[in-house]
């Protein structure tokens, strides 16, 4: 495994939106936005209720990852005036020098439906391909009851590859998922 660092301090999406490292001052926004019941229903690992302890643990985790090989894996989505409005991250399924990653993301309710996440996913996946030469495939799975997220991915260049029945279990309920992927061409 290489010790190549892919860490940068900012990924520019457009004149309003950037991806940046999470900061300690993001705690209040994390608690506010991640307590949204719609967001909770559409994510696998965000706890509910989302407490100050969860936010503190998250901020410690992302601070620690900054110095790890590969650098930042989880980025905050920042609006020029509103500050933190979401997050996006990659899970290196085959390691830093591997061919396969998976992405996940969330966006605060007041900013949904404006095309922001499509631009973020498009730019973030371009950045992943640009900074990781061995990366060939980026996957994403969305709950079948969340077609809006599947549409975001499709508009960002992902292709539907399948439907996985009962792929996830959350609170004792099995959830189907739509599987999508974007390939380096």
Image (spheres, rainbow, N blue to C red):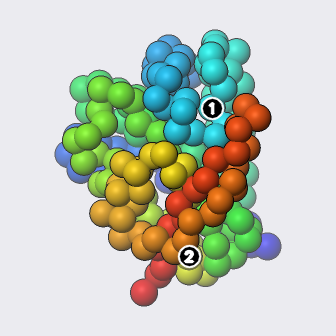
Please indicate whether residue 22 sits to the left or right of residue 3 in the image: left
Q: Nearer the viewer, residue 175 or 138?
A: 175
Q: Nearer the viewer, residue 6 or 57?
A: 57
Question: In the figure, 33 relative to 2: above or below?
Answer: above
Q: Quadrant of residue 27?
A: top right
Q: Nearer the viewer, residue 163 or 185?
A: 163
Question: In the figure, 15 relative to 151: above or below?
Answer: above
Work out which quarter of the rendered image holds the C terminus and state it.
Answer: bottom left
Question: In the figure, 142 relative to 51: above or below?
Answer: below
Q: Residues within 10 Å of mark 1 (few under 14, many from 20)?
A: some
Residue shown at the point (63%, 21%) measured from the top left: 48
Q: Dot 1 corresponds to which residue?
A: 46
Question: In the figure, 39 relative to 25: above or below?
Answer: below
Work out which quarter of the rendered image holds the N terminus and state it.
Answer: bottom right
Residue shown at the point (45%, 46%) measured from the top left: 146
Q: Find residue 10 and report its horizontal and vertical position in percent.
A: 42, 48
**In this rendering, does residue 182 appear at all?**
yes
Residue shown at the point (30%, 63%) measured from the top left: 155
Sequence order check, earlier mark of 2 and 1 = 1
| Marks 2, 1: nearer the viewer | 1
Please indicate whether residue 168 sits to the left or right of residue 86 in the image: right
Residue shown at the point (30%, 54%) measured from the top left: 119
Q: Dot 2 corresponds to which residue?
A: 137
Q: Find residue 23 and report its horizontal and vertical position in percent.
A: 53, 28
As helix, strand or loop, the secondary structure at mark 2 comes to: strand
As helix, strand or loop, the secondary structure at mark 1 comes to: loop
**In this rendering, does residue 181 appear at all?**
no
Q: Find residue 77 and report its horizontal and vertical position in percent.
A: 41, 39
Q: Quadrant of residue 6?
A: bottom right
Please give the label number shown on residue 18: none
Please indicate whether residue 40 sits to the left or right of residue 172 in the image: left
Q: Find residue 108 and report its horizontal and vertical position in percent.
A: 39, 30
């Amino acid at each position: 495994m290489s010790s190549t660092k892919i860490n940068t301090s900012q990924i520019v999406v457009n004149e309003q939106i950037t991806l940046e490292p999470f900061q300690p001052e993001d705690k209040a926004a994390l608690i506010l936005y991640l307590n949204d019941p719609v967001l909770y229903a559409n994510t696998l690992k965000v706890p509910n209720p989302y407490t100050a302890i969860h936010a503190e643990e998250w901020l410690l985790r992302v601070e620690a990852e900054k110095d790890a090989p590969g650098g930042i894996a989880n980025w905050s989505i920042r609006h020029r005036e509103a500050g933190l409005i979401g997050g996006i991250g990659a899970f290196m399924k085959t390691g830093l020098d591997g061919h396969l990653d998976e992405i996940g993301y969330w966006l605060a309710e007041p900013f949904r439906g404006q095309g922001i996440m499509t631009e973020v996913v498009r730019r973030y996946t371009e950045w992943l391909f640009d900074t990781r030469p061995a990366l060939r495939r980026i996957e994403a799975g969305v709950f079948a009851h969340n077609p809006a997220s599947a549409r975001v991915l499709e508009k960002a260049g992902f292709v539907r590859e399948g439907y996985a029945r009962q792929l996830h279990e959350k609170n004792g309920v099995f959830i189907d998922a739509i599987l999508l992927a974007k390939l380096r061409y």
